[in-house]
Amino acid sequence: MNLWRLPNIQLAPEVIFSIFGFQVTNTLLCTWISIIVLILAFYFGSHRKDMIPRGWQNFMEWIVDLLRGLVESVSGKENGRKFFPLVASFFFFILVSNLLDIIPGVDSIGIIEPSKLPAGAQPGLLLWGNASNAIIPLIRPSTTDLNLTIAMALVAVITAQVFGFYTLGAGGHLSKYINLRSLAKFNFQGFIEFFVGLLEIVQEISRVISLAFRLFGNVFAGSVVLAIFAFLLPAIANIVFIPFELFVAGVQAFVFSLLTLIYLQLAVTGHEHHEEEHGHGEAAGHAAAH
Amino acid sequence: MKQKPPSVWGPLALVGQLGFTIATPTILLAILGNYLDGRFHTVPLFILLGLLLGLTSGIYGAYRLLKSTGVL
């Protein structure tokens, strides 16, 4: 008899229970926990509003101020105020749900799946031997669910579209994708610009997938590494991996929100900077010709 | 005028995303091309077109990403 079995790695989240036919998965439970943690963190960060912040309030204000500075340095003061709520929400939510991965018990406390138990096993509070992988974890980090990351990526890309329409107007925004004006120029550069517009359409679609899969892949791989090494080399291997996962959790949360910010900023930037570049190119061309 | 110091945060956004930016459109359009080839029985045509367009789009996207994060 072996001491334990490696945990099952499953891509899809497990359904824990259902309310009126609405299936509640373990990643959804984790999403609710993250939301509650965030509400508590921000409640205790902001309910006193001291002029000279101390302790927790000071910490939260420091993080929020850091993010606000970053958003405003990328997209300016006016647009920064519009983009900040979405970008900061993404950052805090992804950070908290990634960090839940590190807490012991996540991915390993759960309910017993009777169909996976070997014959004759008597499940107790702890599972040993052949029965040790017959468990459905109650909490699983929500960013290891592809549904959540695709949903967030869709929110990011669609919000960018909405801001694009809102800022540039329908004509200005759509001409980024189907550039009839440069097609009407009927020269080589015009065709290239029209073609680049088509590439932009492909880009928008692939942004959803690349954002979603990068976050999902990194966090899921991290949680699998933590789970497997906890069984392969208990107590020792995770001295290395837990700090690494802490780093990954922060970086992934930051990368997702920064990319959202960049996409929002690209959406509200019209053709002017392109035309400026072309202007330079033409000027250089004229200078060369003369 | 004083030059702005290079930001550490911009390049950090490229972690993992740069590869995905190039790979995703290529794979997407290759799948689309494969489907169209099966539909119209024109086997190498659309998948090659899709790969070409996807790779171009990926490189263009990577360029945009590098440009907007201040690396280029």
Image (cartoon, coloured by chain):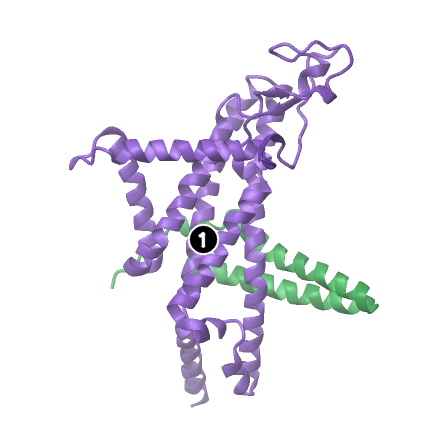
Identify the chain drawn in purple.
Answer: A
Q: Residue at x 26, y 36 (%)?
A: A46
Left or right of A126 on screen, residue A75: left
Left or right of A169 on screen, residue A4: right
Answer few, some or many: residues within 10 Å of disc 1's Cα (few below 14, many 20 plus, some between 14 and 19): many
Q: Quadrant of residue A270?
A: bottom left
Camera-nearest residue between A31 and A54? A31
Q: Residue at x 58, y 22 (%)?
A: A108
Residue ID for mark 1: A260
Q: Is residue A187 above or below residue B5?
A: below
Total labels: the figure holds 1
- Label 1 element class: helix
Quadrant (top left, top right, bottom left, bottom right) of the N terminus of chain B: bottom left
Quadrant (top left, top right, bottom left, bottom right) of the C terminus of chain B: bottom left
Q: Position of residue A261 (x, y in %)?
A: 41, 54
Q: What chain is tagged by disc 1?
A: A
Q: Position of residue A142 (x, y in %)?
A: 53, 36
Q: Is residue A50 above or below residue A85?
A: above
Residue located farthest toward the front when viewing the structure as drawn: A20
Q: Amino acid at mark 1?
A: Thr
Q: Residue at x 52, y 62 (%)?
A: B63
Camera-nearest residue between A223 and B23? A223
Identify the chain drawn in green.
Answer: B
Left or right of A157 on screen, residue A64: left
Residue located farthest toward the right when viewing the structure as drawn: B41
- Is residue B12 among the parts visible in the rendering? no
- Is residue A143 among the parts visible in the rendering? yes
